[in-house]
Image (cartoon, rainbow, N blue to C red):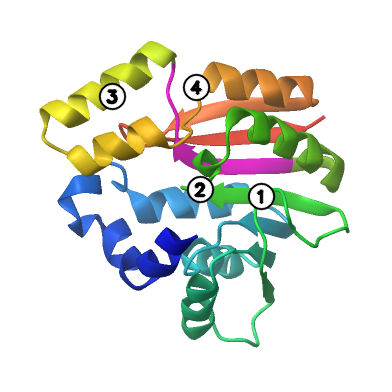
Amino acid sequence: MDIFESWAASYDHTVSSEDNEYREVFKHYELILEKVAHLSKGHVLEFGAGTGNLTKKLLREGHTVTAIEPSKEMRRIFKEKIPGHLNYDILDGDFLRFEVSQPVDTIVSTYAFHHLTDQEKSKAISIYQKLLKKGGKVVFADTMYQSEIAQLEGIEEAKNANLLSLAKDLETEYYSTIPFLEKEFTKNSFDVTFTQCNSFVWILDAMKR
């Protein structure tokens, strides 16, 4: 959490692709957020809302948004960027700890699901299946890999390019493979597709059967 508190002030600079270390990770950032917002419907539950970049696009699409963000500093910047009269709530919480009990139409997140271990991801997907209405969706954009071999190759490529902070991030965060996520969503009664957006990021679009 300390990392996010200190990152809040420079987060928007990082995702603008001006940070060479993460330039490829955040390539097409605005377009990725727009795609997630466009794939969403109805009342949207957003995890890891950060400084509100995706939330703004969801609101422009006419959605009602319940945004969940564990960082107090991120929530402060969020509230500075988005007028309070718009159709949203911003709440403390995370992927597994949140105070939302009413069914929602869509659950979204961008650049955040990798903070959960695979075991925690499995638990989260099971929770979301119960929270979504029939026909409801999960739409996540995050770094994913087609295989464990591809993941190791990505780390090695970052090291060879002297992108050492990126390489460390890829080694220490809990980035999942697409086969794992496909298996977990399928066994929880979702139909799921994956669309690649850049060398790292894919959009997972899962509909509850």
Amino acid marked by disc 2? Ala
Name the element at disc 4: loop
Residue 122 visible in the picture = yes
Name the element at disc 2: loop
Question: Which circle marks residue 154 in the picture?
Answer: 3
Residue 63 visible in the picture = no
The answer to whether the residues at label 2 and label 1 have Cβ atoms under 8 Å apart is yes
Based on the displayed image, in which of its 4 quarters is residue 153 positioned? top left
Structural distance between the alpha carbons of marks 3 and 4:
12 Å
**Which residue in the structure is indicated by mark 2?**
112
Q: Counting residues from the N terminus, which is met first, the one under dot 4 or under dot 2?
A: 2
**Which residue in the structure is indicated by mark 1?**
95
Name the element at disc 3: helix
Amino acid marked by disc 1? Phe
Structural distance between the alpha carbons of marks 4 and 2:
15 Å
Most common SS among magenta residues: strand
* Label 4 packing within 10 angstroms: few (<14), some (14-19), many (20+): some
Amino acid marked by disc 3? Gly
Q: Is residue 115 left or right of residue 160?
A: right
> Residue 126, relative to residue 74: is it above or below?
above
At x 71%, y 39%, the residue is 124
Question: Which circle marks residue 145 in the picture?
Answer: none
Q: State which quarter of the image contains the C terminus.
A: top right
Question: Which circle marks residue 177 in the picture?
Answer: 4
Residue range corresponding to the magenta coloring: 137-146
At x 51%, y 61%, the residue is 54
